[in-house]
Amino acid sequence: MSDTLEIGKLLTQPALARPDLLAEPVLGALRTWTITEVPVEEVRVGEIDPELADTAAFCAAYDIPLEISANCVIIAGRRGGETRYAAALVLATTRADVNGVIRRRLDARKASFAPMDTAVAETGMEYGGITAFGLPDGWPILVDARVAETEIAVVGSGLRRSKLFVSGRALAALPQATVVPDLASPAPAGTTPN
């Protein structure tokens, strides 16, 4: 694999060659890579304008199809006085089934998107850049089957100023990850991803 590869309108490099474009927890996860099926060198990073980090703006500006852009959303599940967190990876063309599939997976009475300040504090990542790499130990990572099947998926880097490019099979093989069919459903026509 060459050092620089153009994807859409972005020049990408192996992620570990650009530690300045990775949040600390993400850098730590890549430096201790344990997924034998996919070499860490296949995880690539591209620098972007942080004002264009939100999915719709990013895809439009850099000519990246929404169908390969995967959002990582942090879910808070509550039962009694206990709150448990999980990450859900879903394509930008879909919506996570928070109150159905995810709530049941967390064995929670109620589930909702974690508040922005909580998601940022718990992950050590920037809002708009949160990713499945480097999440706290013990957090389940629920990967929609559509994400796992992508040849290449675009995900956050932990920072708003870059994106990671990685195979769906690498995301499915992350420690704590479980591939879940129908974790998400197609987004209603005319909706804008965030």
Image: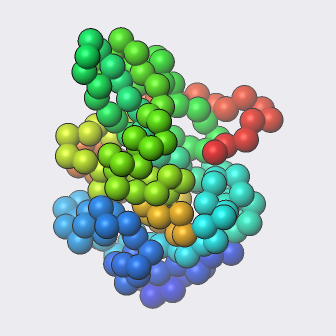
Is 40 left, or right, of 102 in this rendering? left
Residue 190: image quadrant is top right
The single residue placed furthest to the bottom in the displayed view is 3
Numbered marks: total: 0
Is 69 left, or right, of 78 in this rendering? right
The reply to whether residue 167 is visible in this rendering is no
Residue 35: image quadrant is bottom left
Residue 151 lies, in percent from the top left, at 50, 57
Residue drawn at (46%, 25%) of the image: 112
Residue 15 lies, in percent from the top left, at 40, 75
Residue 91 lies, in percent from the top left, at 56, 44
The reply to whether residue 140 is visible in this rendering is yes
Residue drawn at (75%, 35%) of the image: 191
Residue drawn at (46%, 57%) of the image: 126
Q: Quadrant of the N terminus?
A: bottom left
Residue drawn at (44%, 44%) of the image: 117
